[in-house]
Image: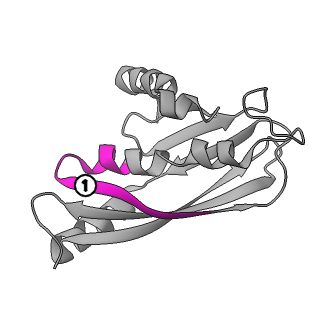
Amino acid sequence: MAESLRTRLERTLLNFFPAYRGTGGRIRYIAADWSEVRIALPLNWRTRNYVGTIYGGSMYGALDPIYMVMLIKRLGPDYEVWDKAASIRFRRPGRSTLHATFRVDDALLDAIRADALRDGRTERTLHVDLVDAGGEVHASCEKLLTIRRRGRRAA
């Protein structure tokens, strides 16, 4: 799906948001319905660590907010979405630009809505990898998100 004018503007604004800009990551693409987001994390003077590879904090920081924002956008104002936990496994040093593709499909949204309607809230663990141009995984991240229907507290 192509980017819309609205998601192109949102991408530009998110890339200039100071907290995200400081990670060194750049959002490169947002699908018109927020079902897919692609980011790039270059190796440059801002992301380089003491030994000349991409700083692990930049790797995690570039990945951190994306799934939460995607779910907020896709689920709409009737739902609250919060990060609950995260883990990252660094598999190899980043010596070139790394890329990540985040996807949230309709089946996942339907399952979240059904669980939240039944229980008031639900949790989901979502996974994303940072890969180089050759497809080699440099870091794997899991995000645990909690989703709640607004105006209704879980028991």
User: SS class of the residue under badge 1?
Assistant: strand
Q: In which quarter of the image is residue 34?
A: top left
**Would you say residue 20 is visible in this rendering?**
yes
x and y percent of residue 100 in the render? 64, 45
Q: In this view, does 112 lie to the left or right of 143?
A: left
Considering only vertical position in the picture, is 49 above or below 56? above
Residue drawn at the location 46% of the way across and 27% of the way down = 17
Q: Verify whether residue 81 appears in magenta.
A: yes
From where the camera sits, is residue 107 visible? Answer: no
Circle 1 packing at 10 Å, graded few (<14), some (14-19), many (20+), is some
The residue lying at 30 percent from left, 71 percent from top is 122
Work out which quarter of the rendered image holds the C terminus and state it.
Answer: bottom left
Stretch of the chain drawn in magenta: 71-87
Q: Which residue lies furthest to the bottom in this view?
A: 155
Q: Position of residue 78 (x, y in %)?
A: 16, 52
Q: In this view, does 148 lie above or below 133?
A: below
Q: Is residue 90 left or right of residue 37?
A: right
* Residue shown at 57% from the left, 39% from the top: 38
* Residue 123 found in image quarter: bottom left
The location of residue 99, given as percent across then percent down, is: 69, 41
Residue displayed at 81% across by 39% down: 49
Q: Is 36 left or right of 108, judged from the image as shown?
A: right
Q: Is residue 118 above or below residue 20?
A: below
| Residue 61: x %, y % from top left | 59, 44
View extreme (left): residue: 151
In the figure, 149 relative to 72: above or below? below
